[in-house]
Amino acid sequence: MSVFSRDALEGSPLADLHAIASELGIEGFRRMRKADLVKAIIIDQGGDPGPDPEPEPVDDDEGDDQAAEKPARSRSSRSAAGSSRSRTGGRGGSRVERGSGGAETNVEGTVEVLGNGSAFVRVKPPGQSDDDVYVSAAQVRRCELKSGDKVAGPARPARRSERYPSLVRVVTINGSSADEVSVGTPFDKLEASFPTKRIGFASKSSTLKAISSSAPIGRGSRVTVVGPFGSGRSTTLRMLAAELAGIDDIELFVVLAGVRPEERPEWVAAGIEPAAVEPLTASGDSQAKAIGRAIESARKVTTKGGHSAVVVDSLDDLDSDAARKVIGVARSVAGAGSLTVITASREPVGGETTLIYLVAQDGGKVGDPSVDRAKSKTLRSNLLSA
């Protein structure tokens, strides 16, 4: 089903119709009356325009407003991923199905919304790529897209003087039909409660056994794994992430923030593909943004009644306010879904439901990290049921 229905188009301001027509490459759209423009867009999308509509006058004021928006769009796009009005065709990407000639291609990727309201589909998130696809501000508004959304749909090739291909329409958002996606209750309005469902561990690891007995984790817990360098924080997080990945109804997002380049292969070897990797050279602000994108994706799962989990290794380079925002987003929703956050940090962040303290390993000894059972604890652990 096309996103551009007649009712939606007729109810849109002329500025939005101009933006859509521009992305579709409809020639002479600025000289068209609104009714003729609606018909042209429907025909371009392969739809039936029906009988010819009554002529309508062109709203010159809205046309002027659209023209005034162009410089802002160009400046914002250049600062984020190249000008949206100077795009050239990208080279082959692993997640873009290329057609031949001027044919449309199917694309899927993660949305990054820019400051001016337009967006890009990042086909190799979180970084930029020549295969990224431009999304108009009109489509962002119409489909209520947010950074972190996973979308799919057809894209047309870049035209002369353009750098990037453009998304023709959004077919799916986070795996659901774009016509059926509902935002639901805003995340911040969801009623939070103490976690009541324990996350069980299938592994026989001595570390996980110690966590299960002294600091159990529930769906919706705010967890910080605390320990000095060499205590096995990353190893513990990988163990916990592997357990979460094995639970069918929990959607997992892993972010490696401020890590050494050799650490990502360790996670991949454990069967976990991180949603984002920010290297040692990345600033704290860049790390916070990558974590924020993962959290936004997890929030969407929870607002629709699902269970999600975000694992972050680590919060060491974030300032205290940014770290608390990461921890604070976790919650168990009464009678519905949950968002669990598990992080690593040198010290407690504040506001945790569960604190897991690790003991420094003797001389860098390799093995299961040792949990300080006396200091590790979970608030109201008596509420957790299997």
Image (spheres, helix red, strand yellow):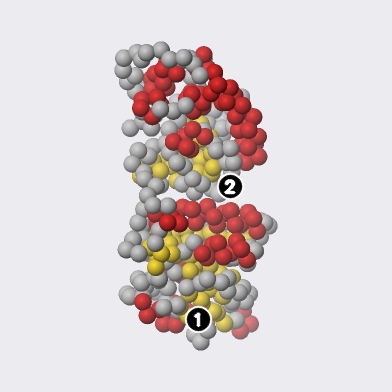
Q: Nearer the viewer, residue 272 or 77?
A: 77
- Residue 197, percent from left and from top: 35, 71
| Residue drawn where x is 48% and y is 75% of the image | 354
| Residue drawn where x is 45% and y is 77% of the image | 379
Whether residue 218 is visible: yes
- Residue 332, percent from left and from top: 40, 65
Q: Residues within 10 Å of mark 1 (few under 14, many from 20)?
A: many
Q: Earlier in the sequence, mark 2 or mark 1?
A: 2
Q: Which residue is mark 2?
A: 127
Please identify the quarter of the rendering in which residue 83 is found: top right
Give, as a three-letter code, the residue at label 1: Ser
Q: Which residue is mark 1?
A: 376
Give, as a three-letter code, the residue at label 2: Gly
Residue 317 vertical placement versus 164 (above, below): below
Please identify the quarter of the rendering in which residue 170 is found: top left
- Residue 18, percent from left and from top: 50, 24
Q: Is residue 194 left or right of residue 115?
A: left
| Residue drawn where x is 63% and y is 66% of the image | 320
- Residue 321, percent from left and from top: 61, 63
| Residue drawn where x is 40% and y is 58% of the image | 190
2 and 1 marks in contact (CB < 8 Å): no
Whether residue 266 is visible: no
Q: Secondary structure at mark 1?
A: loop
Q: Is residue 145 left or right of residue 263?
A: left
Q: Secondary structure at mark 2?
A: loop
* Count of numbered circles in the view: 2
Residue 95 vertical placement versus 26 (above, below): below
Q: Residues within 10 Å of mark 2 (few under 14, many from 20)?
A: few
